Image (spheres, rainbow, N blue to C red):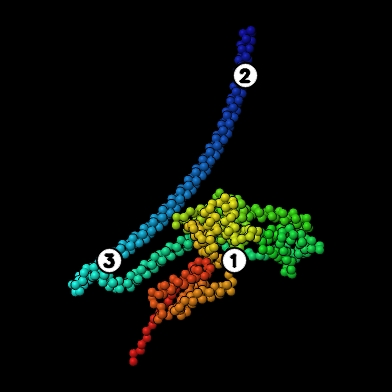
Amino acid sequence: MEIIFVIAGAVLGSGAVFGYSTFKAGKDKQSSVGILEQAESKAQRIQDKAQQKYEEIIKNARSEADSIITDAKKDENKRRNELKNLEERAWERERILDKKLDQADEKMEGIRRQNDELASLKQEIVDIRTKQEDKLSKIAKLTKQEAQDKLLKMTERNIKDDMIGLVTKMQADAVADAEDRAQMILLSAMERMAGDVTSERTVTAVKLTDDEMKGRIIGKEGRNIQALQRETGVDVLVDETPGMVVLSSFDPIRRQVARLALELLMKDGRIHPARIEEVVAKAQREIEKEVKRAGEDAAREVGLVGLPKEMLGLLGELKFRTSYGQNVLKHSIEMAHMAGQLAEEIGADVRVAKTAALFHDVGKAVTHKVEGQHHHIGAEYALKYGMSEAVAHAIKAHHDDVEATTPEALIIRVVDAVSGARPGARNASNENFVERMRDLENVANSFDGINNAYAVSAGREIRVFVKPEKIDDLSAIKLARDIATKIESTMQYPGVIKVNVIRETRAEEYAK
């Protein structure tokens, strides 16, 4: 029995152990499966994140690559355009150089031909003289010296007309070449200028916001308008013209101050004597800044630096001044550009020419304050503020009362006349125009042998018809020169006047 119980106990124990082992093994298996699933899920998440990161990196890399490619293409196009521009400029310079070389070759060839002709003519004269000497010696049995004297007289009579014709032709060619070159230089300088011509005079019209503003400007018993006139020194004209007030003064700076003050008062709405005084003071400061800025901009435009600030301030005032309808500041800037180019062409001092041209009319800014002619005043101010003697002389001599002794001074005279003579630059009355044309014709008619004289091309040319029985060809040349000389000495005019003497001889006969 004991053995049975022992065996039964052993069997029960073994079963219990086996059951426990089986239960534990199943539980461990379930735990392993869960861990494996968790690991796979985590691995999947990591893989998904890696895939997203990979795709993001690829996307960013592609975007950056596209940007780099685009920038590279833009840089390549820019360099291609720069290279193209450089090639075009180089080709243009080469073309211009070739043209100039061709012109130089043509001139040299012409000179060589003339030299050959002169040499041939001299040799021909020598041969003729030798033959004539021999002939005279044989026939008249004269001495060699006597034969030479007679030959010289004969030769002088024979070639006098030919020599006059040759001299006239060479003179005409030289004048034509000089005129062509001068015209090209002046036209090249003038084409760079395209400024508008202003028409500021002695009045300035200010547009009002409404007609009720007129009463506010006048004020109670005229106090506001009196205060405005007193502070600005400008006459304020309030009439029946709708929506308009007129400012009248010979001083354009004052008119500008009054205009700006009136606009500020209308914008602010508070119009009374105390406010008018404040606004006028503010407007004066603004105009002073504008004047200074205008002078600096003008100097910068023509390429001049290091100029006295006082002179730049006077120059800026010319922005608001006109002469014969031409804005003086724009006229000065235009002259400075032309003067610089002319000085460079003839080898003069470019800076002196530009500076003198820019400040040649600066005296007009103070003519209402200082007595004297504007060019003398401008020269005095130039010396006062440290400019050179050459600049002061060019300013002073740009009119005819002072002799121009330097190339720069002559350049200022030329460009002043050119700028004033430009079509549309200045306004001239019909009366003055007709009087100038009549005076020009009277100068020509004052000479003997004149049939008729007509001023044409707005006074730029005078055509003189002479009597052929009194004036021969050589006298016509001298007459043209005499008329031009008298015009230069008796008349004032911008630019150049062409004197054209016309001589015509007609012979008529009838066959019966």
> At 65% from the left edge and 53% from the top edge, which residue is drawn?
289
Q: Are marks 2 and 3 in contact (CB under 8 Å)?
A: no
- Mark in front: 1 vs 2: 1
* Residue 29 percent location from the top left of the image: 59, 25
Q: Amino acid at mark 2?
A: Tyr
| Position of the C terminus by quadrant | bottom left
Q: Nearer the viewer, residue 180 or 485?
A: 485
| 58 to 31, vertically: above or below | below
Task: For marks 1 and 3, give the CA distance.
Answer: 58 Å
Q: Quadrant of residue 94?
A: bottom left
Q: Position of residue 295 (x, y in %)?
A: 60, 54
Quarter residue 242 falls in: bottom right
Instruction: Tell me the CA gap for discs 2 and 3.
Output: 149 Å
Say which residue label 2 marks.
20
**Among all residues in the image, which is located at the extreme left?**
138
Q: CA distance from mark 1 to mark 2?
A: 126 Å
Q: Residue 122: give its label.
A: 3
Front one among 422 and 449: 449
Going from the N terminus, do you reach mark 1 or mark 3 first? 3
Q: Secondary structure at mark 2?
A: helix
Q: In this rendering, does residue 95 appear at all?
A: no
Residue at the image position 63 percent from the left and 64 percent from the top: 200
Q: Which mark's residue is nearer the viewer, 1 or 3? A: 3
N-terminal of the two: label 2 or label 3? 2
Determine whether the residue tagged by mark 1 lies in a helix, strand or loop.
loop
Number of the label disc, if any, that sits on residue 324: 1
Q: Residues within 10 Å of mark 1 (few under 14, many from 20)?
A: some
| Residue 21 seen in render | yes
- In this view, 482 is above or below 8: below
Circle 2 residues within 10 Å: few <14, some 14–19, many ≥20: few
